[in-house]
Image: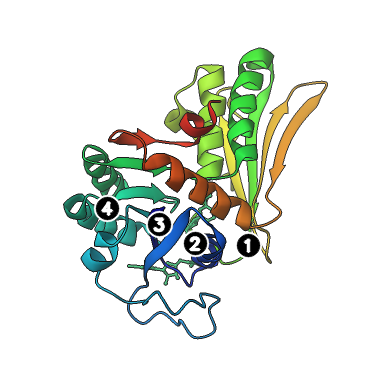
Amino acid sequence: MIDLCVLGPTGRMGQQVCQLALASTGIRLASALERRGANVVGSSVPNSTIRIGESLPEALAKADVYIDFTVPTATTLTARAALHEKTAAVIGTTGLDEEAQEAIDELSKVVPVFVAANFSPGVSLLLHLAETAAAALGDDYDLEVVEMHHRHKVDAPSGTALALGRSLASGRGLDFETARQSTRDGQVGPRGADEIGIFAVRGGDIVGEHTALFIGGEERLEITHRAQKRSVFASGALRAATWIVKQAPGRYTMSDLLGF
Ligand code: NAD
C-alpha cells in the first residue's frame, strides 16, 4: 500500500487525482494540502479521513510520494520541503521556471522524482512519432505545433506543446530554443526554414489538444492528440506514483515508464 499526499486537492487536476486515489486499492490518500484561502467548499474531495490544510512538512511526512498539479511557486516550495522529509515526487505542474527546475533537480539527488508535462500515454507516443516523422521527412517540410486548452489555463504555450517542439527539433537536428517561434504579428517577413512555430488557442472547456504539422509544398501531414477527459492525466499520475516509489533517486519521465 502506498501513502499519497495530494497538493491542490480542490483544483481541476487535484480533484481527479483524489477521486481515483480514494477508489484505488493500492493507494491510500494519506494527506492533502491546499493553499491558504482556497475555496474548499463544494469541491469533490469528500473523504473525512483527510484534513485539508496541514503544514507542508506534516502532510509530506505522512506520505511515501506526493502528486503536484499546482503552480510553479508551490512546486518549488514543496520540492524543497520534500528534500527534508525524503518524500518521492510526481510533478505535473507546467510552466516551471528555473527556480522550480533547480529545486526538482536537488530533490532528485535524494529521492526518485517523476516530472511530466503530460501524463497521457497517447501524448508520449505522439512525442515519439513526431521526432521520427521530422527526421524522416527532412528539410522540405515546415514544422509547426498548434495546441488548444480551456480558458482557465494560465501558461502558454502548454508544457506539452514545448515538449512536442523539442521532439521536432531533435528529429530535425535543430536547437529548439533557437528554432522556437511563438509569435507572428506584424511585418514578420517570410517564414525561416529552421523555424518551429508553436501557437496556443484558448477557450471554453477544451481538456487539451496538440497537433504537430509537417507542411510540404505538395502535402501536409498532421498528427493530433485529443485528451477527452482530465482523468487520463490523473490515472497516468497515479500510475507514475506507484512506479516511482520503487525507483532509485533520480529524475524520470513518461518515456522511462512506458519504454518509448
Ligand atoms: P487549477 O487552478 O484548477 O488547480 C491548481 C490547484 O493548486 C488549486 O486548487 C490551487 O488552490 C492549488 N494551489 C496553489 N498553490 C498551492 C500551494 N501553495 N499549496 C497547495 N495547493 C496550491 O489548475 P489545474 O487545471 O488543476 O492545473 C494545475 C497544473 O497542472 C497546471 O500547471 C496545468 O498546466 C498542469 N496540468 C498538467 C497535466 C499533466 O498531464 N502533466 C494535465 C493537466 C494540467
Label 2 near ligand 1 (CB < 8 Å): yes
Amino acid type for the residue under numbered disc 4: Ala
Which residue is disc 4 drawn over? 79
What is the number of the mark on residue 68? 3
| First reached walking from the N terminus: tag 4 or tag 3 | 3
Specify the farthest residue to the right.
218
Residue 71, position as x, y percentages in the image: 39, 61
Label 1 near ligand 1 (CB < 8 Å): yes
Number of numbered discs? 4
Kind of element beneath mark 4: helix
Q: In this rendered view, identify the residue nearer to me: 187 or 118.
A: 118
**Alpha-carbon span between mark 1 and mark 3:** 20 Å
| First reached walking from the N terminus: tag 2 or tag 3 | 3
Q: Are marks 4 and 1 in contact (CB under 8 Å)?
A: no
Amino acid type for the residue under numbered disc 2: Val
Amino acid type for the residue under numbered disc 1: His
Asked if residue 89 lies left or right of residue 26, the reply is: left
Which residue is disc 1 drawn over? 150
Residue 36, position as x, y percentages in the image: 32, 78
Specify the farthest residue to the left.
84
Q: In this rendered view, identify the residue nearer to me: 26 or 240.
A: 26
Q: In this rendered view, identify the residue nearer to me: 38 or 153.
A: 38
Q: Residues within 10 Å of mark 4 (few under 14, many from 20)?
A: many
Q: Are marks 4 and 3 in contact (CB under 8 Å)?
A: no
What is the number of the mark on residue 154? 2
